[in-house]
Image (cartoon, rainbow, N blue to C red):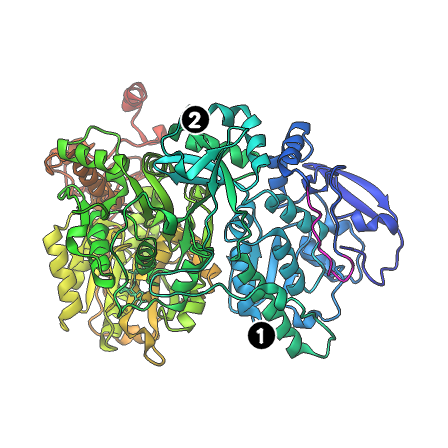
Amino acid sequence: MSNKRPGSPKEEFKVRIKIKDGVYKESLKSKNSEQNSSINLPNHPISTVDPRKNVSTPDSSGNSNEIEPISDPVLAAQQDVKAGLVPRSARLEFFKDDDSYDILAMPRRDPVSGKFGKGDYTYLKLKKDHSSRPLWICPGSANIILEAFSPIAEQAIDFLIAISEPVSRPINLHEYKLTPYSLYAAVSVGLETKDILDVLNRLSKVPIPDDVVKAIKQCTVSYGKVKQVLKHNRYFVESSHADILQRLLRDPIISSSRLIEPSDKNSTSKTNDSSGLVKFSAPTSKELFIAGKHINSIETPSELKTDQLTEESKISNEHKAIDIQIEAEMDAADEDNEDEEVHAFEILPTQIEVVKKRCNELDFPMLEEYDFRNDTINPNLNIDLKPITTIRPYQEKSLSKMFGNGRARSGIIVLPCGAGKTLVGITAACTIKKSVLCLCTSSVSVMQWKQQFLQWSTIKEHQIAVFTSDQKERFSGDAGIVISTFSMVANTRKRSYEAQKMMDFLHSREWGFLLLDEVHVVPANMFRRVVTSIAAHTKLGLTATLVREDDKIDDLNFLIGPKLYEANWIDLALKGHIATVQCAEVWCDMTPEFYREYLRETSRRRLLLYVMNPRKFQICQYLIWFHQNRGDKIIVFVDNVYALKAYAQKLKLPYIYGGTSQQERMRILHQFQHNPMLNTIFLSKVGDTSIDLPEATCLIQVSSHYGSRRQEAQRLGRILRAKRRADIGFNAYFYSLVSKDTLEMFYSTKRQQFLVDQGYSFKVITHLDAMDDFEDLIYKDKQSQIDLLHTVLMANDNASTLEDEDMMREDSNVKNEVSGRSKIVIKKQGATIQSLSGADNMAYMEYSDGIASRSKLAGLSSRKGVGSAGMSMNKPSSSNEERHPLFKKQFNTKK
Ligand SMILES: Nc1ncnc2c1ncn2[C@@H]1O[C@H](COP(=O)(O)OP(=O)(O)OP(=O)(O)O)[C@@H](O)[C@H]1O
């Protein structure tokens, strides 16, 4: 790449290089050295010169990206690491946000472009036919910008999804980012370094920057060469390159994890060579095979590769050419050039994670593949999709990434909420046709999975077993399906006799397929326990939102496998697979009384004040009324249980929270679905996931869990599956009610980020005009608002934290599930003396020197007024200044 600006007036320019924070080094660059100025910078890991490798770079037209074969990649990687030339950690540095050079110091062609700071790429040389190419590739970072309006955008998106992480995908411009994991995922679905560079180059308006080329090469050249396979309940590290395995075995950590057996009873399928490695015959079939489909391998790319981009004028031909090329490259990825034989060495089952980690560090991450069609050891499961079951194109596409080369790859499939992840998992199970262990997040999901297996596949009821606190079943026959929860399987506490027997059964056998639902919510250590204790050939993680607020998403890549496919929410909505949704943030003014208290209160109680804001009540009531009249079915989400009850009781509507019995839940949900008189229900966060209500078409969010992007997306998912989604002009509605000028506004913006990145836009509604004419509006007069405030202020302190009670209950239930003990939960809870004496709801007034310090009713009655209760039961003030001198000492001593 050249970063020379055409027409630049100066032949020499100053480069300012950041050495460390606040310290810059300036140097003059001549015209000749200009080419390297943005790439070969001190501290820039990619710029480190490796004398052993002679890596070619693209010419100015960007058409040459030939890869020099590296004779011994293991040796090279090890030497690199040893010599500290390009340590792995440093390589990964490239993928972090880089501010190690100051692009502002570069010469500018005009006075405006510099305003864009690091985003000023006007110096890049455009290819002649750039208008027909849809991508921009940013030097100095791994970001890729796509013109989503390009005629070949769809193909480009397919390719970008395979090699990079989507960052943001609004309607016209998408942003993607290359990461080591995304490149690892690309290799794992069969793309090679050359394919990636060729297609990128073909799509890009500018030559691929040198640093990006290098980063791609470094991250992919050794990937995909080593595989972890499970045969006869024994773990092997397998590769078609014997030399790579020998090199890996020179590593002390890996060699100490090796298991050497003097004689092998199963030696019919393998032979030992002189190096002690065992040989297996390589899988033979390379057909893409998915249950319900049978697609032959697609034509070889060589026939199509003759197409070249030509003149600027032939834009449509160019689009076609690029289009064909991309498809050819992508299809070529599914071709497999395995040797007839592969080599392997065995590792101790207890050391799998250690070896996996070590291989990662040595830049040989292990792929997990399962040649299920040639597995004659594990009994087959008699399961297929029912003839009436038709999988949708995006479901098929995601599965083609998993079964692309005729074998099953472990990894994660990301599909929007309501897009049918369950059927994807079931189709994968029908394809592999071996025993399945399916893990979900709750016992409700367990029953839903069982029902869906029976609905979509030919499996018989006796072949499915459920393992929960209530049911500990075994399937009949050699092969079958077990559905359970993560917590049941990962538990380390003492188990009941029945549960232990069930666990022994799960541990004793080899599973063809481990299906993991909602993978993003399960803690990494729980995963680790499941993944390392269950012997499974293939792992498939399903999720809608690969985001976690704790940034532990990388753990999933390591423990399950790379992301195999990620669908675009808006795209599926446009195609009618999920509903189109109008999203709105409704600003609710705080009443003056509520706001005054809000400013005085502690942050905990503030939450209650902005949720219980009377204006919010009114807007919620109005929206329910409005949408019911339109014929919508409405779900109102209120996280805080105190507020949930207050809203539902005021509006005389049913509600479900953690404490609602299963029977009551089912009754309410059934009524909501089938009774035309019940069109609105209130749910706490128990309804965030696993509630399949295709009747719901409108969602109102009154309170939520701080800034959780995942929760926002999952809630939206409740209406994406709307039954009426395919009706012409149909829209579902998502309202988020936010009390104005409170913390809620900040959280709301944060929560929306994931959906905004998926291309959703939130309208802001500041005033609902027609609401003022609504006669039955609640809390219309000042007195009723003040009464509400009284109630809120007098509420037990726990009211503002009650939202966790749902989860506590669920947790306790899980613990009981696991231990198989009685379900009566005795919960120890902190309580204040006034709670114990039953004085929680007493009004009081505190006398002080004219300051009604922490009086809950401060501001509502005269400060010098007389309290209604003769005793002062408020909590001790935190401020000594507000205390009588007599008590100051006592308070300090207590503290
Ligand atoms: N190929 C298909 N044909 C017909 N219906 C389908 C298909 N795929 C999914 N569905 C239906 O779409 C709805 C949503 O499916 P599912 O519950 O699997 O979604 P999900 O992606 O798991 O959602 P969430 O993440 O919100 O749990 C279900 O009612 C399911 O029956």
Point out the quarter of the image occupied by ligand 1.
Answer: bottom left
Type of amino acid under label 2 = Leu
Relative vertical location of residue 770 with respect to residue 336 in this rendering, above or below: below
Residue 95 can be seen in this image:
no
Going 55% across and 34% down the picture, which residue do you hit?
245
Type of amino acid under label 1 = Pro
Going 85% across and 47% down the picture, which residue do you hit?
33
Q: Is residue 451 left or right of residue 202?
A: left
Tag 2, which secondary structure? Answer: loop
Q: In this view, does 849 lie to the left or right of 162?
A: left
Tag 1, which secondary structure? Answer: loop
x then y, percent, for residue 273: 52, 32
Instruction: Find disc 2 in the rendering and name its residue.
Output: 259
**Crowd band around label 1 with a 10 angstrom C-alpha radius: few (<14), some (14–19), many (20+):** some
Relative vertical location of residue 531 with respect to residue 438 in this rendering, above or below: above
User: In the picture, which quadrant includes the N terminus?
Assistant: bottom right
Going 31% across and 76% down the picture, which residue do you hit?
770
Q: Name the residue at the bottom extreme.
A: 728
Q: Nearer the viewer, mark 1 or mark 2?
A: 2
Q: Is residue 573 magenta?
A: no
Q: In the rendered structure, which segment of residues is drawn in magenta?
A: 59-70
Q: Is residue 22 left or right of residue 290?
A: right
**Crowd band around label 2 with a 10 angstrom C-alpha radius: few (<14), some (14–19), many (20+):** some
Residue 205 can be seen in this image:
yes
Spatial distance from mark 1 to mark 2, Cα to Cα? 54 Å
Going 44% across and 53% down the picture, which residue do you hit?
750
Q: Is the magenta stretch mostly helix, strand or loop?
A: loop
Q: Along the line of sight, which residue is nearer the eye, 786 or 214? A: 214
Instruction: Find disc 1 in the rendering and name its residue.
Output: 151
Q: Which of marks 1 and 2 is nearer the N terminus?
A: 1
Q: Along the line of sight, which residue is nearer the eye, 75 or 646? A: 75
x then y, percent, for residue 78: 63, 31
